[in-house]
Amino acid sequence: MAQRLHLGDRDLLRCRFAFSPLWETQEAVRTLTRPDRFPYHHGRLDRMRAAAAGLDLRPLWRLMPHRGHSPDFWAPPPDGATAEIGEELARVRATDPAAARRDLATALRSVRGGTESAWGRALLAEPARAVAEAADLLERAWHALVEPEWPRLRALLEADVAHHARRLAEVGLGGLLPELDTRVRWEGRTLTVDKGGDHERWLRGEGLVLMPSVHTWPDVVTGVEEPFQPTLVYPARGLASLWTGVPERAPDALVGILGAGRAAVLAALAVPGTTSGLADRLGLAPSSVSAHLTSLRTAGLLHARRYGREVVYRRTGLGTALAEGKG
């Protein structure tokens, strides 16, 4: 049982990385249906449950079978490397009703009794309404479940893309793909993902989207149905430490070079973070953390990027080498 994508010359030139706040929203909703399957989110689940208390997520949950197909139009692959949630929701709302009906019919066949149920028949009878209601509910789920954590999640996703983009330059597509997940194989010009269901698609210049996710482990997800660009969703690097409250201890040698405060901040940035988040984790005053971050950035050990009102810091290659005692 495997999913296979056959790539041509033009497809090899159109392979790209991306990440999607809408995908993370959809999968955050799914996480609430099977919390035991996502142990790395246990520290966050209580917050998510409380935030979801005012939402009726059943219309989404009904089409999230443990095995099977959820509607592709809920979270189509982003057009660019990064996406804004408003743009993605606008694409959902612009879904052609006829295409949505076909997608919903496929999804309903994955749900026991879905096609014959009253709610399933209602979806197929009014696909335009189904599109609008799904988009509205996904938007509310974004604000409740993902937006409060998005700077931290986005920083992790961005760090994953930066790492794997470097690996792509170093080892090529054939070397990179098996590194993303053990179920991914590259043979000739065929991408094979060992997972339930047999499906093949011959690409004609569409290319491939490689998309890290914080809500996918232990699965790897393939989006292979037309008309969407084929997508491989894989678990992002660093998930194990995403919600840990105990930062990595700075090595004594690093403390000797940078001093205790700056060394602690650099060590803690094994996972990208914000000034306030680092202050909470390290038990330091935000003003002290801010001063350390400025010094480390000036020294070329950190990158900083603003997302709305938050600035997220992550280590540069030099910062990682110093923190890990390499080079």
Image (cartoon, grey):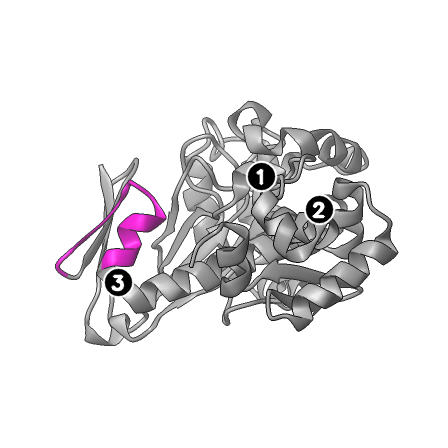
Q: Label 2 sits on what residue type? A: Ala
- The stretch of residues the image draws in magenta is 175-188
Pointer 3 residue: 171
Is residue 126 or residue 57 the one in the foreground? 57
Q: Report x, y in % for residue 220.
A: 39, 43
Reading the chain from its start, which is encountered first: label 1 or label 2? 2
Q: Is residue 306 visible?
A: yes
Q: Residue furthest left?
A: 188
Q: Report x, y in % for residue 242.
A: 60, 42
Q: Label 3 sits on what residue type? A: Val
Q: Is residue 131 visible?
A: no
Residue 241 badge:
1
How far is disc 1 from disc 2 in space, using C-alphas?
Answer: 24 Å
Residue 291 badge:
none
Is residue 236 or residue 1 the one in the foreground? 236
How far is disc 1 from disc 3 in space, using C-alphas?
Answer: 27 Å
**Residue at (24%, 76%) from the top-left corner?**
10
Q: Residue furthest front?
A: 256
Q: Nearer the viewer, mark 1 or mark 2?
A: 1
Q: Label 1 sits on what residue type? A: Ser
Pointer 2 residue: 141
State yes or no: residue 48 in magenta.
no
